[in-house]
Image: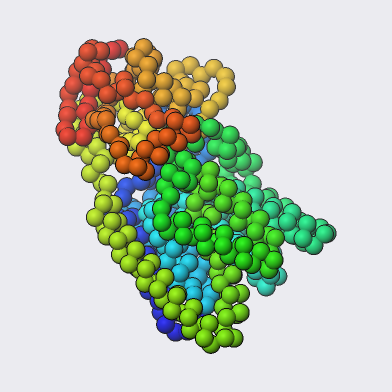
Amino acid sequence: MNRFSKYLNFLILLIFAATVFFRGVVIIDPDLGWHLREGQLILQSGIPATDPFSYTMSSYAFIDHEWMQNVIMYSVFNSFGMFGLAFFYAVIFAGIFFVISTNKFNNFTPIPLLLTGLIMLDFTGVRTQEVTWLFLAILLRIILDKNAWSKFKYFVPLIFLPWVNLHGGFAVGIVILLLYFVLNSIKNKKISFDNLIIFILSLLATFINPYGTRIWHEIWMQITDNNLHIYIKEWFPIFFDFDLALGIMLSLSLFSIYIYRKKLNLVTLGIFAFLLLMAISSTRHVMLWVISAVLLVSETLYLFFKEVRKNKDSLARLKMARNFVVIFLLIFSVFKFYNVLTTSDNRNSYPQNAVFYLKSQKINGNIFTTYDFGGYLIWKLPKEKVFIDGRMPSWRRSGYFPNESNYAFTDYLKMLSNDKFFISQIKKYHISYLLLPRYTIITKNTVIDKINNFFEKFIYKDIDYHVLSEDLTKKGMTRVYGDGQFIIYKTNLF
């Protein structure tokens, strides 16, 4: 790789890392609040055995597969505030970029790097998933390179020791390791007992956490939960968030596979296909596939560069084409950065003033708010519990639990659309205040919106908020607060 390409790659890394830092400062993830409170609680009194934040499932054996990351998040935030937390995740992003940018790269590497950065911008910020992206990048760098595998394969189980305590994405790593073992055995027509032992040790390493084997129960609950793909936006199929950079990366990777299908390793193709299927099923998994895609494209670019560098004329023409593509992507990046810098700030979309009002009240009972703001209330009203938040959509159980729910998310959905059930839940849980966003009907008329609306009818259901969008004073409640975004009702029903 020439010096210019190295400097350009480094510049790309810095620009995108800086943008990730900015997003981390101005974007509050809906789950940030409960992550910080959980980290604080663990440091103060240890890992809770049951759910400490909800009144609907307070006896539920909550498995926090991110407990260690929550502790780190709270510690960084407590010491350095939001700027420190944003910087911490920007460093993780830079680590991901560094890992994927050192794999057989040459003078053409700015193209996949720019594409990766452009795609990542839509998914980054202060988000716990980034830890899984980093560990996955490290794991793939080892197993997709023969030399790296021979040197570091016995260290692979050690990767899962921190991973299982930092984020539930460790399960993807185990599946990929299993794929590597199976596909490698098929390719070589024999079983490598070294590889089998490494897989077994890696699997056993995932049991070294505060919950033991129960950590896999939480993974299973999410895998088997259809509601995630129906109601939660980040679990929607990939085409709901499809953009130009993603389309180019997909086209480039598929074209690379077609051209070099005879030279690519079966393991590389198998892992790429598996992660692509995951990405198609859910936008949450797009970055897992992108990491595998950029490694695959880097390998094919390396093969391509070795072929064309023998012919000076061909190499010169290809460099011109590369420069054109890089300039196009840089221009596209400018528009992307501008959009990020001007539209990313969502801090005012949270009920800051409404929470301030509730703090001034003597609350006798519980508070209800919608799913999107549960984590925020856990953070800003630490003495109060919530009906539901971002941890809970997959929580379900059988048995009898007096004054609690067996499946809070389905109760929540029913509560929003059924007047009688809504009232019964207010009485059951002694809900004295309702903090609700103002619901307005938004008409979508663009071609893309119409296409999405067509698919939405068959793929997922929009949440019916009609109960909460009504004037609840007609149901005997008192409106005690209102601003341009939020309304607070006092229920007077128990």
Question: Quick one: 457 or 377, which is closer to the camera?
Answer: 457
Is residue 108 found left or right of 324 in the rendered image?
right
Q: Residue at x 27, y 47 (%)?
A: 346
Colour scheme of this structure image? rainbow
Q: Where is residue 98 in the image (x, y as percent from the top left)?
A: 48, 69
- 303 on left or right of 24: right
Quadrant of the frame with the C terminus = top left
Residue at image point 68% right, 60% down: 267
**Residue 334 shows in the view:** yes
- x%, y% of residue 1? 50, 81
Does 110 appear above or below 66?
below
393 is higher (above) or lower (below) than 448: above
Q: What residue occupies the far right of the structure in this picture?
A: 190
Would you say 155 lies left or right of 241 here?
Answer: right
Task: Identify the residue at image location x=54%, y=33%.
Answer: 225
Q: For residue 234, which quarter of the picture?
A: top left
Query: Is residue 334 placed above or below 50 in the rendered structure?
Result: below
154 or 253: nearer the viewer? 253
Q: Position of residue 482 (x, y in %)?
A: 17, 29
**Residue 271's image quarter?**
bottom right
The x, y position of residue 399, in whole percent, is 57, 19
Which residue appears at 34% of the width and 64% of the height? 333
Res. 201 in view: no
Give the mark count.
0
